[in-house]
Amino acid sequence: MSQAVTYESNNHIALITINRPERLNAINEEVEIGLANAWRKFNNSNDRVAVLTGAGEKAFSVGKDLEYKAFPEYRRFVPGCDIEVRKPIIAAVSGWCIGGAITLVQMADLCVASETTKFTYPEAKLGFAGGLIAGLVSRIPHKVAMELMLLGEEISAERAYQVGLVNKLTPPGEHLKEALVYAKRLAQNAPLVLEMLKTFGIRTLPKSPIETASFALREVDLVKDSADRTEGLDSLSSKRQPQYQGK
C-alpha cells in the first residue's frame, strides 16, 4: 500500500483510509492506485468486511485534486466497476464529500455519516463529469439524485439519511467507531451468504452506462491479461498448436 491509502487488518475487518488530510483527502494518481490496490488486497485476504474512510474530520474526500492535471478514471478504483468486490463495504464519512468521492459512497453497501457531513456534486458547474454518478438514480429517489447531479448544491447529512444514501447518523467524530460496530457484526455472519446476497443485490439494481461498460471491460481485461493470450500469440509466431490452460 501507499502512504496516500492505508490498509489495516484486524479481526477479519479491513480499514481502508484515504490518507491525505492536508489536501482534504483529494484524489490524485497515488490515491487512485492506492484504492485499486486496496480492493485487490481485500479480495485476496481473509478479511470479511471493509470500512472505507478518510483521514481527519474535515473531509471524507473533496474529489479530484485540482493540482492533478489528469482526469481520474473512477471506474479503475471505485469498487464494483473494473474491480469486482463481492464482500461487504461500509463507508464511514465526515465533513465534505464532494464530486467523485460520492461515487465511493454510492458503491458501498452501507454508509455511516457524521452529522457534519455535506454532500455536493459540482461537476455541472465546473464543466466536467465522468458519469459514474448516474448510478445514484437506482440507489436513492430519482429526483433527489437529479437534484444532486444537475444543481450541484449541498445536501446535508440529515437529508442524505432521509433519502437512503446514509444508513446511520452519528455525532461529530463518532462515524468511524459506529461503522466498526457494523463491521464487527458483519464479520460474525456467514461469509458465503454475505457475498451471495451482495452479489444478487447488485445484479438486481439497474446499472448506469459506466457500470455496464466497466463490467464488459473487466471481462475483456481478463482475456487480454491471460496466460492463454500469451500462449496463443507465441504458438502463432512459432507455428505450433496452442496448449490452452483456461487461465
Image: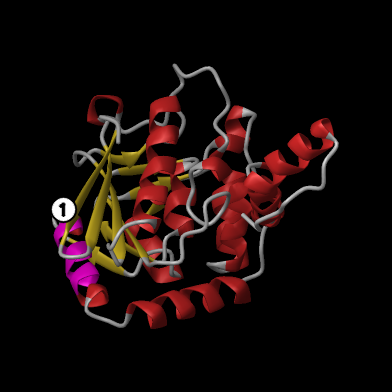
- Give the residue displayed 60% in from the left and 48% down from the top: 132
Against 218, residue 24 (above or below) is above
Can residue 87 be seen in the rendering of this structure? yes
- Give the residue displayed 83% in from the left and 37% down from the top: 236
> Which image quadrant: the C terminus?
bottom right
Q: In this view, does 134 lie to the left or right of 99?
A: right
Foreground pick, 238 / 98? 238
Q: In this view, does 107 lie to the left or right of 235?
A: left
- Give the residue displayed 60% in from the left and 67% down from the top: 138
Residue type at tag 1: Pro
| Residue 48 x %, y % | 30, 67
| Residue 211 x %, y % | 64, 55
Q: What segment carries the magenta color?
A: 176-184
| Residue 117 x %, y % | 30, 50
Foreground pick, 171 / 67? 67
> Which image quadrant: the N terminus?
top left
- Please, what is the dominant secondary structure of the magenta stretch? helix
Question: Does residue 93 belong to the magenta stretch?
Answer: no
Within the image, what quadrant is residue 161 found in?
bottom left
- Dot 1: what SS? loop
Q: Mark 1 points at which residue?
A: 172
Against 43, residue 36 (above or below) is above
Within the image, what quadrant is residue 113 found in?
bottom left
Against 101, residue 184 (above or below) is below
Can residue 94 be seen in the rendering of this structure? no
